């Protein structure tokens, strides 16, 4: 596993408050997210979270590491964006949430053409009639 991926999971756990939410955000299972945090803790030699049955809260070491980790993630994102700007090919993820009817009739039909034009953009379409 990539050290940078471990840092990304750590940042999302701090921001979202749970392993399951961070795992969903990073497209990994809660078990994988937990293993990445454990691997990061093992690498750093400190505990990053105080764990209870209901809550994860960062330790003092975790809060300090979070501040630096956010800067690392921002720097990597800026570097990737600069490369994308140079090549004039946008990259990233586009998340679209829409009602089922509108999504089927208007949005879904345009995705193949959009993907052909911008192949480095991952489109995540979530259609639901639930509030």
Image (tube, rainbow, N blue to C red):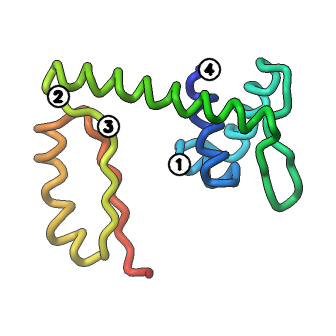
Q: CA distance from mark 3 to mark 2?
A: 10 Å
Residue 40 horizontal side relative to residue 85, left or right: right
Estimate how packed mark 3 is, as few (under 14), some (14 to 19) or many (20 or more) residues with alpha carbons within 10 Å.
Answer: some
Tell me the number on the disc at residue 3.
4
Q: Point out the image quarter for the C terminus.
A: bottom left
Give yes or no for contact between labels 3 and 2 (Cβ–Cβ under 8 Å).
no
Q: Residue at x 13, y 56 (%)?
A: 110
Q: CA distance from mark 2 to mark 4?
A: 26 Å
48, above or below 128, in the image: above
Estimate how packed mark 1 is, as few (under 14), some (14 to 19) or many (20 or more) residues with alpha carbons within 10 Å.
Answer: some
The residue indicated by pointer 1 is 25
Q: Secondary structure at mark 1?
A: helix
Give yes or no for contact between labels 1 and 4 (Cβ–Cβ under 8 Å).
no
Estimate how packed mark 4 is, as few (under 14), some (14 to 19) or many (20 or more) residues with alpha carbons within 10 Å.
Answer: few
Residue closest to the far right: 52
Q: Nearer the viewer, residue 29 or 91?
A: 91
The residue indicated by pointer 2 is 89
Percent position of residue 21, x then y: 62, 54
Q: Point out the image quarter for the N terminus.
A: top right
Percent position of residue 95, x then y: 34, 54
Estimate how packed mark 2 is, as few (under 14), some (14 to 19) or many (20 or more) residues with alpha carbons within 10 Å.
Answer: some
Tell me the number on the disc at residue 14.
none
Quadrant of residue 64 in the image? top right
User: Along the polypeptide, which appears first: circle 2 or circle 4?
Assistant: 4
Give yes or no for contact between labels 1 and 3 (Cβ–Cβ under 8 Å).
no
Q: Residue at x 77, y 44 (%)?
A: 58
Give yes or no for contact between labels 4 and 3 (Cβ–Cβ under 8 Å).
no
């Amino acid at each position: 596993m990539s050290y940078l991926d471990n840092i990304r999971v750590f940042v999302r756990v701090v921001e979202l408050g749970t392993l399951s939410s961070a795992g969903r955000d990073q497209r990994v299972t809660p078990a994988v997210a937990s293993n990445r945090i454990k691997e990061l803790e093992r690498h750093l030699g400190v505990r990053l979270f105080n764990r209870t049955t209901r809550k994860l809260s960062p330790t003092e070491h975790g809060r300090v590491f979070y501040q630096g980790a956010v800067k690392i993630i921002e720097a990597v994102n800026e570097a990737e964006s600069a490369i994308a700007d140079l090549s004039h090919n946008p990259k990233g993820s586009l998340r679209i949430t829409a009602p089922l009817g509108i999504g089927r009739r208007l949005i879904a039909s345009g995705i193949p053409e959009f993907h052909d034009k911008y192949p480095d953009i991952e489109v995540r379409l979530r259609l639901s009639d639930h509030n």
